[in-house]
Image (tube, coloured by chain):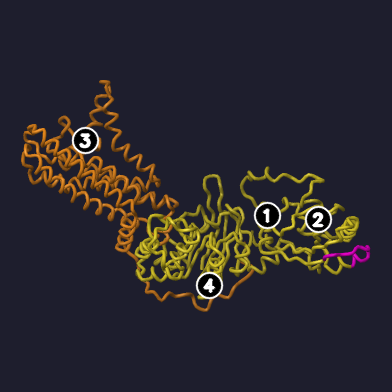
């Protein structure tokens, strides 16, 4: 069990982590998400007593890390796969850590086997690939067979087989009753590995909830509608009809329409009434990745320090094809085809809180307010 | 914040490792540091080069002195050990700095301090292992060189027992102490190249600066620099009387001065290592 209370870290004028409170419970894999520079690594370093919090505190099993009676036997961590002396062999590296922690030397060969590095144990780690480095780091974390495990970006540089292995390893470790806290940028990977999520943005807590709750609270489901490409007039007609009926319509580059705020049957009825033939009418559910992008985009609202990035977010000019057009615009603005799209500027998110959307609509976006409340 | 929205039932049993748990102590840290220092090539390289310099220069100087057949009066041949000690000190400085600064350079220090949250224990273990290793190696080779020099240069007088002790154990202890000062400085500066540069500057610059102090107004500064520069103190270690002028350290005093400086630097290193973020 890791417990942070009011954790704050300032470096000079820069606030890396601000008033962060959360708990990481044993028995499940807890994902730790946040954009680059959001304070994930700083938080992990504070958990491990490497950095001193400016205010607040964080404990593991009730004790600050540096006061734990047998710290390396209770907590294992992978912070940075490259944090090894490149001139030392994998075995010597692990042996020195085992000796430091009072762990029997035979445990070194066990963990080398667990991570699959037994054949290169005598090689200097300088020649290791990033994936091998990650395995070595995971081996170091497992040395003490600890109850609490922290992994910072453990699947970085791993091949698909390695990613699958890490995923199963995390789940297995958690199922044994351990506390497993994993940070990652790979949202799809987190969706498969983690059960619980802690999301931070700009050093502040954005969400602390299960993965399924997180997706449903932050998803942006939509319907993709395609009209015959040969008749562009039909597309415009349908756009006008759907907009008048209260839907929001965005245009995708290949001519399809992205509709939110209207259920699928209603779109079909409206098209029928307008005499527009449909080539495609399909539901699309947001991935964790999309939910995460929406969530962390909201972090802009919570910024505590001045934002030097603000000038980079140029406001969209009217008439310019883009994502943030007013929903009432009859001609559908364009969005990119992929699910991974540039988030809208703050306050202009056409998916957020469509007031006309009927409450029972399967595409109605739930108000993200319940998650933001959580952050306070 | 409010309580998290989703509560998981805690696992029925917290995980308990089958590996017996025992408290780690300084002995474990010493074993770990010994593994670390012997498993990197920089240790072998710096110590290997140091041995070559001590042997090569020590024997070379003795051979030249023997060939010149110049009378040496009541001086013993042990004083020639200084010429090997000066270049050897650069190797010791490098190794001392690298012992800790390489951990900062690679990020290994975070892994180390995660495996042992007691930072003082880590630094103590590093200091002890480093000191004993350098002291042993330099004493052994200083003794070898001293024996050879006394045997080769037959115009010099026979050294006394105290002189033998200072030329072997004293020289080894002085170099190891200088290395320990480098280790403390490496802890404070946390950067290999930076700390090595500072240490080599500390070793050589006072003497170089003093060489060019022609002005009479700076005479006292020049004298102090000449007397207390590290190379001068190494020479003083081999001599009963102050080698430059009437004042200044001689005999075992240079070692005490170096020990004092090192103790102060180590105290600073402990304090900063304990309070600083890594």
> Tag 4, which secondary structure?
helix
Viewer-nearest residue: A284 or B266: A284
Where B256 falls versus A145 (above or below)? above
- Across and down, in percent, residue A357 comes to 82, 63
- Across and down, in percent, residue A150 comes to 50, 64
Does the magenta-highlighted stretch encompass residue A298? no
Res A258 → quadrant: bottom right
Res A88 → quadrant: bottom left
**Disc 3 target residue:** B232
> First in sequence: mark 2 or mark 1?
2
User: Residue placed farthest to the bottom in the image?
Assistant: B12
- The segment highlighted magenta reads A269-280
Please give left or right for residue B234 compared with residue A254 in the image.
left
> First in sequence: mark 2 or mark 4?
4
Res A197 → quadrant: bottom right
For mark 1, does the 10 Å Cα neighbourhood hold few (<14), some (14 to 19), or many (20 or more) residues? Answer: some
Viewer-nearest residue: B138 or B180: B138
> First in sequence: mark 1 or mark 4?
4
Work out whether disc 1 and disc 4 sit on a shared chain: yes
Chain in orange on the image = B
**Disc 1 target residue:** A297
Viewer-nearest residue: A35 or A284: A284
Q: CA distance from mark 2 to mark 1?
A: 22 Å
Subunit of label 1: A
Work out whether disc 2 and disc 4 sit on a shared chain: yes
Q: CA distance from mark 1 to mark 4?
A: 30 Å
Q: CA distance from mark 1 to mark 3?
A: 65 Å
Q: CA distance from mark 2 to mark 4?
A: 44 Å
**Disc 4 target residue:** A174
For mark 4, does the 10 Å Cα neighbourhood hold few (<14), some (14 to 19), or many (20 or more) residues? Answer: many
For mark 2, does the 10 Å Cα neighbourhood hold few (<14), some (14 to 19), or many (20 or more) residues? Answer: many
**Disc 2 target residue:** A251
């Amino acid at each position: 069990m890791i417990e942070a209370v009011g954790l704050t870290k300032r470096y000079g004028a820069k606030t890396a982590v601000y008033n962060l409170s959360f708990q990481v419970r044993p028995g499940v894999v807890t994902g730790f998400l946040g954009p680059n520079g959001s304070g994930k690594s700083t938080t992990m370093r504070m958990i491990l007593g490497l950095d001193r919090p400016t205010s607040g505190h964080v404990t593991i099993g009730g004790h600050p890390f540096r006061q734990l009676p047998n710290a390396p036997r209770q907590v294992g961590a992978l912070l940075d796969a490259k944090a090894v002396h490149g001139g030392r062999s994998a075995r010597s590296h692990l042996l020195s850590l085992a000796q430091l922690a009072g762990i029997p030397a035979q445990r070194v060969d066990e963990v080398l086997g667990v991570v699959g590095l037994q054949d290169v144990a005598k090689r200097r780690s300088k020649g290791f690939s990033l994936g091998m480095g990650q395995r070595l780091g995971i081996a170091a974390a497992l040395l003490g067979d600890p109850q609490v495990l922290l992994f910072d970006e453990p699947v970085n540089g791993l091949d698909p087989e390695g990613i699958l292995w890490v995923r199963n390893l995390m789940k297995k470790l958690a199922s044994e009753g351990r506390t497993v806290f994993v940070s990652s940028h790979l949202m799809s990977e987190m969706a498969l590995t983690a059960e619980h999520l802690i999301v931070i943005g700009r050093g502040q807590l954005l969400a602390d909830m299960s993965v399924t709750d997180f997706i449903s609270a932050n998803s942006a489901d939509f319907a993709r509608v395609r009209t015959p490409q040969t008749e562009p007039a039909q597309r415009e007609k349908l756009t006008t009809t759907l907009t008048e009926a209260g839907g929001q319509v965005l245009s995708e580059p290949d001519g399809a329409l992205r509709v939110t705020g209207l259920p699928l049957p209603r779109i079909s009825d409206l098209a029928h009434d307008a005499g527009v033939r449909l080539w495609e009418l399909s539901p699309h559910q947001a991935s964790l990745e999309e939910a995460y992008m929406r969530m962390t985009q909201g972090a802009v609202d919570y910024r505590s320090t001045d934002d030097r990035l603000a000038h980079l977010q140029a406001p969209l000019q009217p008439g310019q094809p883009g994502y943030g057009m007013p929903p009432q615009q009859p001609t559908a603005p364009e969005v990119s085809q992929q699910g991974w799209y540039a988030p809208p500027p703050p306050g202009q998110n056409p998916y957020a809180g469509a007031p006309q959307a009927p409450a029972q609509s399967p595409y109605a976006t739930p108000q993200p307010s319940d998650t933001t409340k959580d952050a306070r | 914040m409010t309580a998290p929205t989703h509560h998981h039932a805690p696992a029925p049993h917290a995980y308990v490792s089958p590996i017996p748990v025992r408290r780690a102590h300084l002995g474990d840290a010493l074993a770990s540091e010994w593994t670390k220092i012997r498993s990197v090539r920089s240790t072998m390289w710096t110590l290997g080069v140091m041995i070559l310099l001590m042997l090569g220069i020590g024997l070379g100087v003795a051979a030249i002195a023997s060939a010149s057949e110049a009378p040496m009066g009541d001086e013993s041949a042990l004083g020639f050990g200084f010429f090997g000690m000066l270049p050897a000190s650069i190797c010791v400085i490098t190794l001392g700095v690298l012992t800790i600064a390489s951990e900062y350079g690679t990020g290994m220090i975070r892994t180390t301090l995660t495996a042992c949250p007691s930072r003082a224990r880590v630094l103590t273990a590093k200091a002890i292992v480093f000191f004993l290793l350098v002291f042993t190696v330099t004493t052994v080779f200083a003794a070898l060189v001293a024996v050879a020099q006394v045997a080769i240069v037959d115009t010099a007088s026979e050294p006394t027992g105290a002189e033998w002790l200072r030329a072997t154990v004293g020289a080894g202890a002085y170099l190891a102490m200088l290395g320990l000062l480098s280790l403390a400085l490496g802890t404070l500066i946390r950067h290999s190249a930076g700390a090595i540069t500072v240490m080599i500057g500390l070793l050589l610059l006072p003497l170089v600066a003093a060489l060019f102090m022609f002005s009479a107004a700076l005479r006292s500064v020049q004298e102090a620099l000449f007397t207390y520069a590290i190379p001068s103190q190494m020479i003083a270690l081999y001599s009963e009387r102050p080698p430059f002028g009437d004042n200044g350290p001689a005999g075992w005093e240079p070692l005490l001065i170096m020990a004092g400086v090192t103790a102060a630097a180590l105290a600073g290193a402990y304090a900063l290592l304990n309070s600083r973020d890594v």
